[in-house]
Image: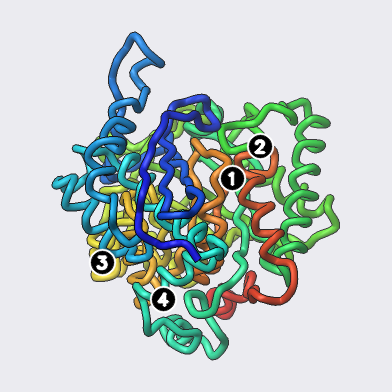
Amino acid sequence: MASTRIQRVHAREVFDSRGRPTVEVEIACEGARPGRAIVPSGASTGAFEALELRDGDAGRLQGLGVRRAVELVNSEVRSALIGQDATDQQALDQLLIELDGTLNKSRLGANAILGASLAAVYATAEATGTRPVDQFRRAWLEHAPNRSAGQASAARGNSTTGPGGDSLLPLPMVNMISGGKHAGGNLDFQDYLILPVGATSYPQAFEWIVTVYQHVGQLLTRAGFEGVLVGDEGGFGPKLASNEQALDFVVAAIEAAGLRPGEDVGIGLDVASSHFHRDGIYRLIATGDEELSASDVVNLLEEWVNRYPIVSIEDGLDEDDWHGWKELTQRLGNRVQLIGDDLFVTNPERLQRGIDSGVANSVLIKLNQIGTLTETLRTLNLALQNGYWPVVSARSGETEDTTIADLVVATGAGQLKVGSVARSERLAKYNQLLRLSEGDEFGYLGGSIFQSLRSS
């Protein structure tokens, strides 16, 4: 077996699914092949996320180049990492955090730091002849050594095994129709998703998803809408008459697939409300420039939950509207999963504020929002300790990198949000999960994780 001492660090500029530059980092241990990781990038970004480092040169790639971040990896980061033990993830990440020296990773860039943080996991896998999922599992158990199936269940209050204990294949949450920043603003709400809560295995869940997606396209085409064009994450991007009409199409597609709305397949919403919120007002363009208060938005979402099989709502209110989030949680928190994305930005301090305030009941987990694997695992563990559902998520600017597929299984987080099933940067993750689903090595809880909601 090769040594796990880092011998080589190299970064390069590559491109993501939107054709924008991003950072790829390779790390090699002594006598081993290099492991590599590519950093994703979001379009719908929260104000409190760790910062990407972009070149800002208007004469090249509209200022989006990442040559400066690459240069910093190939100089400062390389010097700091050479000779370090690639298996000591917490020490490596702390070294990177201290080397950057800022609260939001703005000096080196979260893209440079995360690339190095994740590449160390892949380098360790190469040096030890193991799979990436095994190395992510090792990092998870070292970070949360007392994490067990029993502890995870107790946190949720269920008698059955809950997320965060054993390694688990995830319940997929998948885009069907996109709006907002993911599809040119054709709808106010960003994503209309499905969750195959009744499926008994990951392969069955994914087959249902693909079938429903195909029916969505067919129904849109028959109705005279765009049933072919897709947004950044692969969801269809039709110019519908209203935000609610998208829900009608998704329900119709579930039924056309021979599945039962609510029982077999639930609906998720990514409202991404920070992007239509200004000065305390939520302005919905798709419904005639309608101006709503936070309470009006909560009323609308509650009405939809009463009429549609909605089991999950993400970013229902603005990232700084803590009062509105409190109202939303009080009225819907025992009925649906309420995910904080822009609200929490995978930051343990913001998540702790939400826990202390009784706000939301779930957190989206995005590696590049916080910038290192260790900090990501810290937030995920904090969520589980406090009975919040973690949802590991991709970004709108994705690549062939499959890190989050291995990460979600290794941590047993229970849910994965990748995008739709029409683009290869998305399918790379779903296909990795199909590989991991072979045999009976990993369990699958599926929609049973929502048992406490269903009984409410």
Cβ atoms under marks 3 and 2 closer than 8 Å? no
Q: Residue furthest left?
A: 101
Measured Cα–Cα span from mark 2 to mark 1: 9 Å
The correct choice, above or below, for 400 with respect to 441 in the image is above
Amino acid residing under circle 4: Leu
Q: From the top left corner, tell me how far across and down residue 18 is, in percent.
A: 52, 28
Q: Residue at x 30, y 36 (%)?
A: 74
Q: Which residue is mark 1?
A: 419
| Lower sequence index among marks 3 and 2 | 3
| Lower sequence index among marks 3 and 4 | 4
Q: Which residue is mark 3?
A: 352
Q: Which residue is mark 4?
A: 141
Q: Residue at x 23, y 61 (%)?
A: 349
As helix, strand or loop, the secondary structure at mark 1 comes to loop
Measured Cα–Cα span from mark 4 to mark 1: 28 Å
The label nearer to you, 2 versus 1, is 2
| Lower sequence index among marks 4 and 1 | 4
Measured Cα–Cα span from mark 2 to mark 4: 33 Å
Q: Is residue 86 left or right of residue 443?
A: left
Q: Which residue is mark 2?
A: 423
Cβ atoms under marks 2 and 1 closer than 8 Å? yes
The correct choice, above or below, for 126 with respect to 111 in the image is below
As helix, strand or loop, the secondary structure at mark 3 comes to helix
Q: Nearer the viewer, residue 77 or 343?
A: 77
As helix, strand or loop, the secondary structure at mark 4 comes to helix
Residue 415 in sight in this render: no
Q: From the top left corner, tell me how far across and down residue 420 is, in percent.
A: 64, 44
Cβ atoms under marks 1 and 3 closer than 8 Å? no
